[in-house]
Image (cartoon, rainbow, N blue to C red):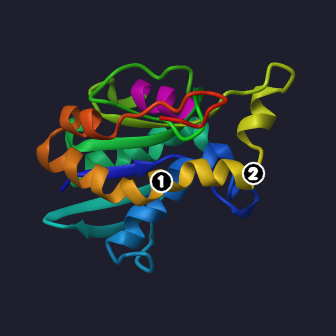
Amino acid sequence: MPLLVGLGNPGPKYDHTRHNVGFALADAAAKAAGAQDGWKVWGAALLCKAALGPLSLLIAKPQTFMNLSGEAVQALLTFYKIPPSDLVVVADDVTLPIGSIRIRAEGGHGGHNGLRDIIGRIGEGFPRIRIGVGPCPPNRDLSSFVLGRIESSEQEQLSPIFGDFPGLVELGFTKGWDLAASRFNRRVDLGSGSV
């Protein structure tokens, strides 16, 4: 059974922050699958079983804080005997303009500490979905930026992603991440709001 992991930090203090876009999209996928009340504590993660169309999958939100995300991911892969190729991780990306999506079948961490920890524990051979939440203003501390709340205007730019996300995940797991990338990858131009 494939595994979708949304990255973020646990606790209400971090709700609606840029760094928790992965958690929010995991919630969106669970809700679309009718599993929004099915979150259970499993080791160092919250976990639910879901179905998106013909696809049955596990959805997880590590509760280890971002920098130790790999601990929960590695435990889930080991217990459920899931190969890294059947894992997809969704994370925020401050190098992409807000509202952008970049899907890759595999690759590096791009400076993201959650992805860095996962790669350090299981290797690079898993797909990832990066969601643009940037760029960080030049006069702003990066940590305070990613832990800052998403403003209402930014929420509007992210909204289409939430509508598309369950279909994106279903397509990626059933037809391949290259096809999902060709259909859903998008870069929002800074300043214009156009795609």
SS for dot 1 = helix
Crowding at label 1, few (<14), some or many (≥20) Cα neighbours within 10 Å? Answer: few
Q: Are marks 2 and 1 in contact (CB under 8 Å)?
A: no
Residue type at numbered disc 2? Glu
Residue type at numbered disc 1? Pro
Q: Residue 105, position in %: x, y?
A: 26, 29
Q: How far apart, in angstroms, are the residues tagged by discs 2 and 1?
A: 16 Å
Q: Residue 44, position in %: x, y?
A: 49, 55
Q: What residue is drawn where x is 36% and y is 70%?
A: 32
Asked whether residue 46 appears in the rendered view, the answer is no
SS for dot 2 = loop
The disc placed on residue 26 is: none
Asked whether residue 187 appears in the rendered view, the answer is yes
Q: Residue 87, position in %: x, y?
A: 28, 43
Queried whether the magenta region covers residue 2, the answer comes back as no
Looking at the image, residue 168 lies above or below residue 98 = below
Please state which of residues 79 and 109 is positioned toward the viewer in this rendering. 109
Residue with the mark numbered 1:
160
Please state which of residues 110 and 100 is positioned toward the viewer in this rendering. 100
Give the mark nearest the N terminus, 2 or 1.
2
**Magenta region: which residues?**
113-120
Residue with the mark numbered 2:
151
Q: What residue is drawn where x is 38% and y is 62%?
A: 29
Looking at the image, residue 61 lies above or below residue 31 = above
